[in-house]
Amino acid sequence: MSAIAETAVLFSPAARGLALREEVRLGLTSTPKELPPKWFYDRRGSELFDAITRLPEYYLTRAERSILERCADEIAELTDATTLIELGSGTSDKTRLLLDALAPRRFVPFDVSEETLRSSAQRLALRYPSLEITALVGDFEQPLPPLPAGEPRLLAFLGSTIGNLTPTRRTLFLNDVASALDEDDWFLLGADLVKSPARLVAAYNDPTGVTREFNLNVLRVLNRELDADFDLSAFEHVARWNAEAEWMEIYLRSNRRQTVRLAALELEVAFDAGELMRTEISAKFHLSRLAGELEAAGLATKRCWTNDAGDFAVLLAMRPARFELATSASAGQRSIP
Ligand code: SAH
Ligand code: AVI
């Protein structure tokens, strides 16, 4: 078989553009202002995230990798999955541990960032020439498309990207995942755990400024795609631990009073000096409560693993037989070819 990965665009450039305009307009006209994190990830944003994963302070990726190194064989044994689907796949770097252990027939990486998705799918195609790869450009916050047939299937959501969803969105997402899976399909979830605020704050405030660049990158995306005139030097990176909500809050702080124009939206937005605009949350979890959230969505946790330091968890859950389906209103995205 030739080493070519097929790519299907479920989130068309037109739909993507419309979503960007709607979400940015809503976020910038809300009080307080906010921007959804999915718009960080153009090519540069994906590269910056990749650089974050190698920072000494950003323990998440290393912790999750160490768990997968230890448990990938067990995951393969328990699930016997022949199709691996990965949401928010990015570079699919850690996923190779799963691909090696499972040796599935088909891999379906799914990401909103088309360039990253295409290049990582091509890289994987070269490394795994007999693997059928169907890369999907899509938004996992919209109803998931029908998953490819070929049970047993394993749907992976790694990196604690689940922490970037607000609690309401997280509930909707988990319900959607449960609806998308058939009986005896599996869900593999990587989640960062609550720990000392000092370590958390350090992970999102690296002294080399990579996280700051990643955060500011969303303004570059808006300048390019919405013909906006954000002056990046007029915003500062702020990352704080919210102890009550148990999440990191990432903001851009306007360092002066200013007005920004977004020509494509015919919108002018005034910022006060010191005003905070939230660009991301990164929720941290307690293992038992997270398993409870999965259960409430109809997903039974069968196994979970943490790294030695107890920083990070990987949960393996399944759609038990006889679970009553709340059918997904799956109209938002086309089905998978
Ligand atoms: N899973 C990888 C990458 C995590 S970075 C890891 O564990 O390292 C988060 C990834 O999710 C990025 O590749 C980003 O493009 C993607 N992403 C963020 N929001 C998304 C959304 N709403 N729909 C689909 N992909 C999304
Ligand atoms: C992708 N996501 C899980 C990262 C996180 O840790 O919340 C994004 C990130 N933001 C700043 N640093 C990393």
Image (spheres, rainbow, N blue to C red):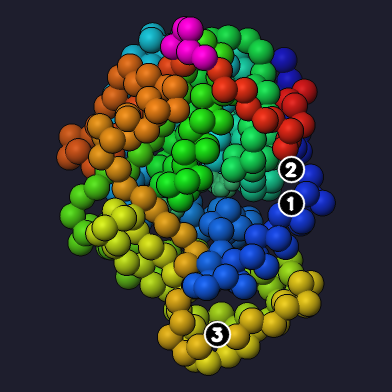
Query: What residue type is disc 3 on?
Result: Phe
Nearest-to-viewer mark from 3 and 1? 3
The Cα atoms of the two marked residues, 2 and 3, are separated by 32 Å
Q: Which residue is mark 1?
A: 16
Q: Residue at x 43, y 86 (%)?
A: 274
Callout 3: helix, strand or loop? Answer: strand
Which residue is the extreme one toward the right? 14
**Residue 323 forms part of the magenta stretch:** yes
Q: Residue at x 50, y 64 (%)?
A: 279
Disc 3 within 8 angstroms of ligand 2 (CB): no
Disc 1 within 8 angstroms of ligand 1 (CB): no
Instruction: Please determine whether, in this image, residue 170 is positioned above or below residue 209.
Output: above
Instruction: Please determine whether, in this image, residue 132 is positioned above or below residue 184.
Output: below
Instruction: Please determine whether, in this image, residue 256 is positioned above or below residue 337.
Output: below
Q: In the image, residue 244 lies at what x, y percent? A: 26, 58
Counting other residues with Cα less than 10 Å from the Cα at mark 2, is it few (<14), some (14-19), or many (20 or more)? many
Magenta stretch: helix, strand or loop mostly = loop
